[in-house]
Amino acid sequence: MDNSTFEKNWEINFTQCYSNARIRYSDLSNLLQLTAGEHATIAGFGFREMAKNNQTWVLSRIRFEINRLPKWMDIVTIKTWIQHLEGAKSTRNFEVYVNNQLYVTATSYWAVINTVKRGPEELAIALGDFKTFPERHSTQKPFSKLNLAQTVKPIENYTVKISDLDIVNHANNVKYLDWCMDRLPMELVLTNQIVSIEMNYLRELRYNDRVEISGNSTDKGYFMTVTKQERVSFALEIETK
């Protein structure tokens, strides 16, 4: 059986939704990553297998392009495949469908890190006949390295809490997105104005780290950062209609 592509259906439940009954952006990101995790497990390089070599996948960059957001009780079909996989780096793409209509596309860039050394490392697991799809794109634009020199204004200080941590003992990547979305105008988040979201994860954060959340409007939408001791840990760029 060829495990090189994967798809899974998910039902959107009310705990995953904003007050407008549309899925939260962080929960959408979470579903994509859960789907990717199941695919990796079936293909032989999931969390448990990689842990045997003190390795794990870490999300570095991701870009969403949004036609519309799934809503409460929708059955969404998430399709995923790997475009590139070499050494310590991987590009994974996604498509999100509801009733055969394409709602969201995403492209993501992942790195293998050694969980003991906390640094990048080539994937230790042999891939066998697993196939990649170099010409199969999902989004109109690729993920990119965001311009960190953009002007931002301090919004709020935040301390990383226990509920922000995941099984790798650092702040889970979807938490950064929540921190930023919670500090945007409510009408922007809830009225389907966002057409793309791009994120760069630069440095991990741990329990009790104190960070500064900053942002500013741009000619395309918004740009936001999460910084610790004046070093950017996370950057977010939002394009609006």
Image (cartoon, rainbow, N blue to C red):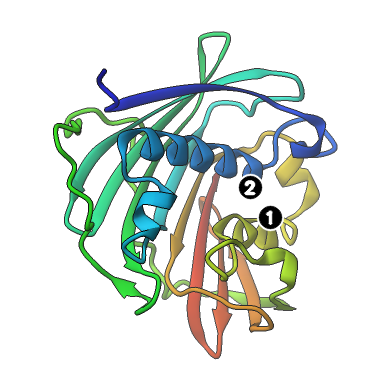
Residue 161 image offset from top left, x and y in percent: 73, 73
CB atoms at circles 1 and 2 under 8 Å apart? yes
Residue 226 to residue 88: above or below: below
Q: Which residue is mark 1?
A: 181
Q: Which residue sits at x=61%, y=68%? A: 215
The image quadrant where one finds the C terminus is top right
Residue 48 image offset from top left, x and y in percent: 43, 51
Residue 213 image offset from top left, x and y in percent: 65, 74
Q: Earlier in the sequence, mark 1 or mark 2?
A: 2
Q: Which residue sits at x=71%, y=45%? A: 188
Residue 189 - label: none
Residue 26 - label: 2
Does residue 144 show up? no
> Residue flagged by tag 2: what amino acid is it?
Ser
Q: Residue furthest front?
A: 52
Q: Residues within 10 Å of mark 1 (few under 14, many from 20)?
A: some
Quarter of the image where one finds residue 80: top left
In the displayed structure image, the side of residue 160 where residue 92 appears, left or right: left
Quarter of the image where one finds residue 137: top left
The image quadrant where one finds the N terminus is top left
